Image: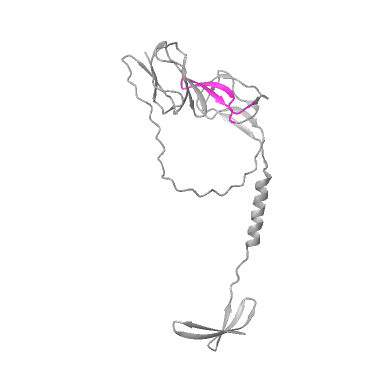
């Protein structure tokens, strides 16, 4: 039996612990006996360690990412112009599957992953609506690389935050009297400008290509004309109805 003396707020208490059975202790304070229940703390370190070990094994295993069936759907209503692939053909990410005309543009519909063409639901000249099935591609399984261990970053002095430069809006151009404006039908990014100022173009000639909604779109001249102003350049981001080219 152990005795302890405590002084609390100027009062002295003589305490002894007689016995402990399971989680109940017999405690005597200044001659008065109390049965004190001791709360036991659950021990979890072994479980945590096991979970960490399991996570380490799973990350080191680097399982293969299984292939699956990917359905390519029409992003817009339009008409199928030409189909570039056939059933059983292998394709790579970025390959053109078919071209379609939509919103007065020639659009290239591309594969988003490596795989094999399993089914084609459309044919040249067929009209399609948004989200209609175009092509099924069975994607190829790729082994996932093991995750590299993260190294502790070295402490670095805090640097003042610099504001990222804001993208400049598409420049406004004065349209000469009688000039015809060619505007962007969709938000996107200019891939390539194919004409220059002063160049004569015919109806159907491609003026520039625009990437929008994961498609490469050809912006074409709607009539025979002369290019009087080119407003955009390759790599520039444009919004819907932004001015691209002026024809005279």
Hey, which residue is sitting farthest bottom in the picture?
Answer: 31
The magenta stretch is 91-112
**Magenta span: chief secondary structure:** strand
The spot of residue 160 in percent (x, y) is 41, 45
Q: As rendered, which of 60 and 148 lies closer to the eye?
A: 148
The spot of residue 239 in percent (x, y) is 41, 28
Residue at image coords 68%, 42%: 63
Quadrant of the rendered structure where residue 245 is?
Answer: top left
Residue at image coords 53%, 30%: 131
Q: As rendered, which of 141 and 11 lies closer to the eye?
A: 11
Hey, which residue is sitting farthest left in the picture?
Answer: 177
The spot of residue 70 in percent (x, y) is 61, 32
Q: In the rendered view, would you say 24 is above or below 119?
A: below
Residue at image coords 66%, 54%: 53
> Quadrant where the N terminus lies?
bottom right
| Magenta stretch contains residue 96 | yes
Does residue 64 appear to the left or right of 162 in the view shown? Answer: right
The spot of residue 57 in percent (x, y) is 68, 49
> Quadrant where the C terminus lies?
top left
| Magenta stretch contains residue 191 | no
């Amino acid at each position: 039996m152990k005795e302890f003396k405590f002084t609390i707020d100027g009062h002295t208490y003589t305490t002894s612990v007689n016995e402990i059975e399971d989680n109940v202790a017999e405690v005597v304070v200044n001659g008065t006996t109390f049965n004190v229940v001791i709360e036991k703390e659950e021990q979890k370190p072994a479980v945590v360690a096991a979970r960490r070990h399991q996570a380490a094994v799973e990350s080191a295993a680097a399982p293969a990412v299984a292939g699956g069936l990917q359905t390519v759907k029409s992003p817009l209503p339009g008409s199928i112009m030409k189909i570039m692939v056939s059933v059983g053909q292998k394709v790579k990410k970025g390959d053109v599957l078919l071209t379609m005309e939509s919103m007065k543009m020639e659009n290239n519909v591309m594969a988003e992953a490596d795989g094999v063409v399993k089914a084609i639901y459309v044919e040249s000249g067929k009209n399609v609506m948004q989200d209609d099935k175009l092509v099924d591609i069975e994607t190829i399984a790729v082994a996932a690389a093991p995750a590299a261990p993260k190294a502790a970053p070295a402490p670095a002095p805090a640097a003042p935050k610099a504001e990222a430069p804001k993208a400049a809006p598409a420049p406004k151009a004065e349209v000469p009297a009688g000039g015809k404006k060619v505007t962007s039908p969709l938000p996107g990014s200019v891939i390539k400008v194919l004409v220059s100022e002063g160049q004569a173009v015919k109806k159907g000639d491609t003026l520039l290509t625009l990437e929008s909604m994961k498609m490469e779109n050809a912006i074409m001249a709607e009539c025979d004309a002369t290019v009087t102003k080119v407003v955009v350049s390759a790599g520039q981001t444009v919004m819907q109805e932004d001015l691209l080219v002026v024809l005279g």
